[in-house]
Image (cartoon, helix red, strand yellow):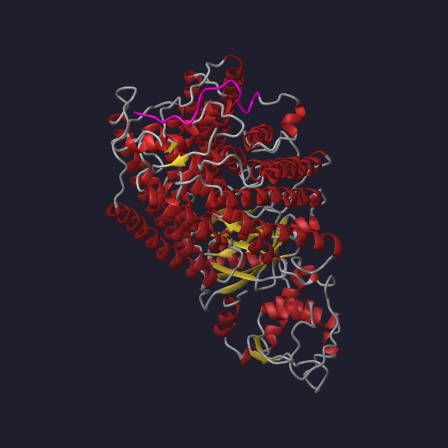
Amino acid sequence: MKLPFFPEQASAMAQQVDAISLFAVSISFVAGVGIVAVLTWLGLRYRRSHRDEVGSAGHSSNLLEIIWSVIPGIIFIGLFFWGAKIYFENYRIPPDAVRYYVVGKQWMWKYQHPSGNREINDFHVPVDTPIELVVTSEDVIHSFFVPALRVKRDAVPGRYSTTWFEANRTGTFDIFCAEYCGAEHSLMIGKLHVMEQHDYEEWLEGNEPAQSLAMSGAALFEQNSCGTCHRSDSSARAPILDGIYGREIALLGGGVIVADDAYIRESIMNPQAKVVAGYQPIMPTFQGQLREEEILELISYIQSLGKKAESRTEAAAAVSDEGE
Amino acid sequence: MSSAALHTQSDTNYLNDGFGIRSWLLTTDHKRIAILYLITNTLFFFMGSVMAALIRIELLTPEGDLVQPDMYNRLFTMHGVIMVFLFLIPTIPAVFGNFLIPIMIGAKDLAFPRLNLGSWYVFNVGAALIFYSIFKGGLDTGWTFYVPFSSTYSATNVMTAAVGIFIAGFASIMTGLNFLVTIHRMRAPGMTWFRMPLFVWAHYATSIIILLGTPVVAVTILMVGAERVLHLGIFDPAYGGDPILFQHLFWFYSHPAVYIMVLPAMGIQSELVAGMCRNRVFGYRAVCYASVAIAVLGFLVWGHHMYTTGQSPYAGTIFSFLTMLVAVPSAVKTFNWTATLYRGSISWETPMIYAAAFIGLFIIGGTTGVMLGTLGIDVHVHDTYFVVAHFHYVMVGVTMMGFMGGLHYWWPKITGRMYDAFWSKISALLIFVGFNLTFFPQFLLGYMGMPRRYHAYPEQWQTLNVLSTAGASVLGIGFVLPAIYFLWSLKKGKKAEANPWGAVGLEWEISSPPISHNFEETPVVINEAYDYQAGHVGVIPSTEKEADLV
């Protein structure tokens, strides 16, 4: 179904959003036409007939006030519930979703596939597959926006925001940056290429076979000598990272936290913020030494260290629950 | 229609009570200060409009060809900053509020006349800094000043402009405080709360928002400054801050600021509808309470600007729900204004055309606001032209219609002259048509996915953009006409009677233009607002007994 002035629909979410929008527009149209009709009729009917004529006595009606408060109120609240339902679907990442990383940077979009492939601006994804996006930024705030999917998520520096989509048709769709980000904001655009599963796999192979994210992360782990302290064979100066991903850990000074993407990022960039119980705050910061994509690779590596220890579901829950 | 006139038409009035430049620049007369504001703010409006015109010309073609991207970003930023902070927020209270509140409640002036004059100077110092930042290389952060772009990345005059806004905010606070004290303490005998015109109620609600909200934006600006200069980690994650915190603080002020813009215009709307229909506003008390409800609920909905930031979905849900609640009093007002026409005596003079245009535009602005408050819809249209269209419908459709309607309604009272009836109607129609042609296509563009603040855009959106620019030209003509016929009326216009519309209200019971102290003697208020049966609301004390006999 392609309505005029509606962008193409490439996901079930798009249909849902269009349905509620159409509903809201229709109700508004009916109400608006109604009010304008009444206004016009009254305006003509009660035109001033002679110079000194005045209106009839002051009037009010509690019944009318109640009616025209309650009826719009009910409609608004109905819209609220419907809209909230769609919004929560946007937030609830399906357990079988495959995770892709999106990093905004003045003025380009960079993507990392789970296979380790990287792309800039053009983004290839398989059709009919739930795809989780972890969105962040390397500098200012951007916003990843695909009108055909009715999906938008801000890329905020220092924060991982997640959303997901499942494209239900192949094709090429626009990607925009929706949050003003400086001089070339309007050139920060890309294309989403939704492909058949086998085409996607061919595409992955056809492109320089990259290291997986976790492997790149392992190399970074090596380069930055993280293993000097984070050693699994010693009582060491730092927590053992095996199986830590997605698990609850106790903090120095009380409290627990789930070791999700956000926490791991914080621990790399600002290690003193939340130290694991039983350890000293001795880790140096890597602020300014690692790019956002490298941090994501490190996170993937840490995640891979504990594959047996945790299931995919818990990790997804931990991430999607990422609050304030 | 018997009228116990409070005035004797005299030759002296506030306009000819002193002619030198000092008599204007050092005046403490609330009416003259209103005129000072009217002159400066109209000038600011035209400067903001020139930038809008350049933006629309750039967007005629998909390529960014008229100006460089850097220049384009400066244009929409300065358009927004000037229009929001130097026109929409201050103008109706500072011009009409200043001129009318004391008169409407039967007072000789505001409670603090010198503070009132001081506010105009403070405002202009703020405006001067904003213009200085513009002419010394501009500002490119968008009027929203989102960090870390504004705090770390922008190389333009962020701090100068921010300090300008900070200072202009104090002028707002001074005005709001003055109104609150005046409305509490200076009402004439008999002017009870529920006898006050709805214009005064609307300004009362607005003043509360100004006093509670403006300090928050002031503090936020100080924090951006502290971060830019001292590198304190408040907002920038590089220093350990949180950029989303800025958005919370910014919208905590800037969403209520929308109500600072629209509530006074709604107050004007109530006066226009009552005056032109010669009828008491339907559901007077409901409209009073709706103003106060909007002021209170308006503080609790700021998070609806942040549904896509990654703010907790539960917070988003609460903000969405509260947004639905704040829409109810706005709807109630619309129904009451419409119902006021019932059994009225309607004159379709220019102010009434603006009042009708107000309702038409407010329906579109309001219902699209409800759509934006709906979580599932907002994610798609957030930060697109849908939002641009919506807030122009609200800010321009409501605030500008209110301002223009008010100007045409009270111009005879303010200047003592009548303007050209024919051309003012043509102008009102041009503005209405031009406005819709400019902004309605932007709803469609937004839903199709065109993000806001785009210097260049994909070709498929050109037709609608051309329509929008065409509409802006019509709108431009619509706004140039009043500049001509109003100025003309000052020299050649017919002298206005005290009550050219046959309306009821204390301001229509004194001469046009009023004398410096408004009333020869403090009036006693004996009727409710808009009492068209009695035909007047006040009497002079000495004639009170006679009035009782009538």
Closer-to-camera residue (A39/B55):
A39
Q: Is residue B359 in the magenta section?
A: no
Q: Is residue B81 left or right of residue B315?
A: right
Count of numbered labels shown in the rendering: 0
User: Can you tell which quarter of the image residue B41 is in?
Assistant: top right
Closer-to-camera residue (A9/B127):
B127
Q: Position of residue B376 (x, y in %)?
A: 41, 54
Examine the rendered structure and indicate whether residue B280 appears above or below residue B430.
below
Q: Position of residue B335 (x, y in %)?
A: 31, 40
Q: Position of residue A103 (x, y in %)?
A: 61, 56
Q: Is residue B5 in the magenta section?
A: yes
Q: What main secondary structure does the magenta stretch of the protein show?
A: loop
Q: Quadrant of the N terminus of chain A?
A: top left
Q: Position of residue A148 (x, y in %)?
A: 45, 48
Q: Residue at x 26, y 21 (%)?
A: A49
The range drawn in magenta is B1-16
User: Can you tell which quarter of the image residue B57 is in?
Assistant: top right
Q: Residue at x 54, y 27 (%)?
A: B516
Tell me if I can see residue B109 in this picture. Answer: yes
Examine the rendered structure and indicate whether residue B327 appears above or below residue B21.
below
Extreme residue toward the top, this view:
B492
Tell me if I can see residue B307 in this picture. Answer: no
Q: Residue at x 45, y 63 (%)?
A: B314
Examine the rendered structure and indicate whether residue B195 appears above or below residue A206.
above
Q: Quadrant of the C terminus of chain A?
A: bottom right
